[in-house]
Amino acid sequence: MEGQSESGAEKDLKTLISSYSNYVWKRVATFFPSSGSNFLGKISILYPQASRKRRPFLPLPLPSHSLDSSVVMTEACRICDVLEDIMEHIFLNLHNIQKNLQFWQSRAEGSNAQKAYFMMFERGPFAFINGTAQILRDCMAEGGSVQHLCQSASVHISERITVLTTLRSSLATFLAQVYMEVEKYGEELVEDPEKLLPFLLVTINDLFSKLEASIGHLHATRQGDSSIDGSHSFPVLFEKLPEVNQGGSQWTDCEIKDSINLIYQNLQKLDVYLSHMVAKHQKPRKITRYWVHYTCGAVGLSFCSIWLLRHSSLMGSSDLENWICEAKDSMVGFFNDHVEQPLLSIRDELFETFRKRHKGVMEVEEVQMTSNSLHRMLLAFSEQTKGQKLPENASDQEMLEIVMSRYEKELMHPIQNLVNGELARALLIQVQKLKLDIETAMLELDQILRANEINFAVLAALPAFILSFILLMLVRAWFKQDSRAEGRGRVARIQRRLIIVEVEKRIMQYQIYVDQGLEKEAHCMFGLVLYSLDRLLHAVKGHAKETGEWQYLRQDIIDLAKPGLQTAYKLRVTSRLERMYDCLLPSLKRQ
C-alpha cells in the first residue's frame, strides 16, 4: 500500500510539472507575432530592452520639429528605441572602461616606491606571498629585487592601460559613427522611418563589422606578449546580415525582425566580451586594495573578542558586567558634575537675579517720589528766601541756584547760622539732591542690566549651541560626502566643471584631427566628446531641474554634440556653461 501511494504521488507530481511547462510554453509563444502582423507594433514586445526605464543619456540628434506628426513620431520612436539601446550600451561600457582606465593612469603617475607598494600590498594576500618569494629569489640570485619589482609594476600597469585605451577608442569610434549616421539621416528617419529602416540596419551591421575588426586587431597585436592569463583567449565575432538582405530594396516584416534581433544579439555579445576583458584588466576591488588594513583590523578584533570572552559571564567571570556598570556610573557622574549641574547653577543664579531685579532694586516711582520731594523743598526754601511766591513750574535748577547762593552766605558765619540761620536746611536740601542723583544712576544701571538679560541667557546656553553646531556640521559633511559629479557638495561642483574642461579639450583635439585629415582619430575623439557630454548631462539633470535651467542647459549640451557646428561656437557654449548655470558655477567658498 505504501509503494502504491508513493508511485501515485510521483505520477501526480509529473502531471503537475507537465501542465505547468505547457502553460509556460504557451505564454512564451504568444510573444512571437504572426507573419502578417505589423513589425513596428511588435518591437516593444519582442525586445523588452526598448521599453525599460533608462537612465538619462545624450539624446539622438533628431530634428526639433519631429513632434509635429504624432503618427509618424510613434513609428519613429519604435525605431529609435533600437538606436537608443545601442547608445545606452556603449555609454555604459565606456563608463566602466573609463573608471578602470583612470585608476591605472593614476597608478602610472606614481613614483617607483608607490608602484612597488601597489604590487606588494594592494593586489591581495596571494600576490603579497608571491611577490615576497620573488624578492627573496632575486636577492639570492642577482640582488636587484627592488628594481625588478618596479619594472614588473610598470609592465603590469602599462599593459592594462594599453588594452583599456584600445577598447575605449574602438567603442568611441563606433559610437561616433552611429551618432553621425543618425544625425545625417535624421530628417528622413522622422518623415519615413519604415523606408529608411533597412538602410539603417545595413549601416549598423557594417559598423559592427568594423568594430569587430578593430577589436580583432587588439587580439592580433597582443596575443603573444600578454602577461595576463586568458586575457586574449577569444575574439568577439558578431552576427552578420545575409547578403540577400543587404542587397534587397524591399524588406519583409520577418526580415526586419530578424535584423533587429541580430542587433540585440550583437549587443549582448559585445557586453559579454567587454565584461570579460574589463574583468581581466579592471582595478582591484576595494577589499583587495586594503586587505592589509582589514587583516590587521580582523586580528585586533579577534584578540579583543577573546579578551572580552575571558572576562565575560560565559567563562564564569563578572568582570565585564562590573566594568559596564562602573563605566555607566562614571558617564552619568561626569554628565551631572560637568554638564548638567553647572548649567543649572548658572541658569538659576542668573534668573534668580533677574527675578529679584524685576521686583525692584530701584523703581521709577521711587525716583519720581524723591524728585518731587526735592522740588517741594527747593520751592519752599526759595519762596522763604525771596519773600515772594514762585510759579509752580519753576525749574529745579533755578531754585537750586538760589539755595546755593544762600548756602554760600550762610557759610560766612557757620556756627551762628547753623543754630539760628538756614545752613542746616540748605545742607539737607543738598543731601536730598545727592540721594536723587544716586537713585537716578541706579535706575539707569538697572535698565542696562535688564537690556542685557538676553545676552546672559545666550551666554548660559553657549555650550549647547557649540555642541549643536558641531553636530550639524558633521551631519552636513556626511550628507555631502558624495564626491561624484551628481553630488551637492563643493567636490561635486569641481567634478562637473572638470567635465566641461574635458569637453573643451576633446572638441579642440577633434578639430585638429579633422584639419589634419585623420578620419579614424577624429571619429574616436568625437565619440569621447559624446561620452563626456553624456556624463555632463547625467550629472546636471537633477540640479538644473531644481533651478529651472534644465531646458536651456540641455539644449546647449545637445548643440555641443552636433558635429556640423563650428568649433568656435562650441567653445563659446562651453564658456557660457561655466558662467551662467548655477549648478556649474564655482563653489561660493572659492569665489
Image (cartoon, rainbow, N blue to C red):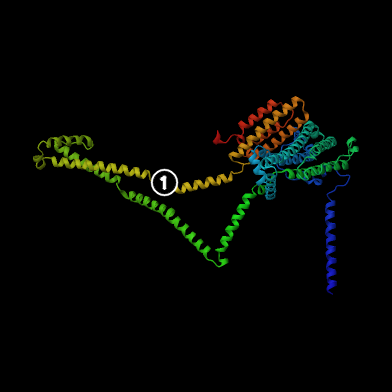
Q: Is residue 314 above or below residue 49?
A: below
Q: Secondary structure at mark 1?
A: helix
Q: Is residue 444 above or below residue 303?
A: above
Which is nearer the eye, 381 or 363?
363
Q: Which residue is mark 1?
A: 459
Apparent side of residue 348 relative to residue 26 in the rendered image (left or right): left
For the question of whether residue 485 can be seen, the reply is no
Q: Quadrant of residue 278?
A: top right
In the image, farthest residue toward the front:
141
Apparent side of residue 305 relative to residue 177 in the rendered image (left or right): left
Residue 1 horizontal/vertical position (percent)? 84, 75
Residue at image coords 84%, 51%: 30
Which is nearer the eye, 308 or 205?
308
Apparent side of residue 420 relative to residue 396 in the rendered image (left or right): left
Residue 349 horizontal/vertical position (percent)? 36, 52
Which is nearer the eye, 93 or 27?
93
Number of residues whose C-alpha sits closer than 10 Å to that of mark 1, classed few (under 14), some (14–19) or many (20 or more): some
Apparent side of residue 383 relative to residue 234 in the rendered image (left or right): left
Residue 557 horizontal/vertical position (percent)? 68, 33
Residue at image coords 70%, 37%: 534
Residue 12 horizontal/vertical position (percent)? 84, 66
Quarter of the picture containing the C terminus is top right
Total residue callouts: 1
In the image, farthest residue toward the bottom:
1
Q: Is residue 336 above or below residue 559?
A: below
Q: Quadrant of residue 429?
A: top left
Which is nearer the eye, 393 or 297?
297
Amino acid type, label 1: Leu
For the question of whether residue 133 can be seen, the reply is yes
Q: Quadrant of residue 189?
A: top right
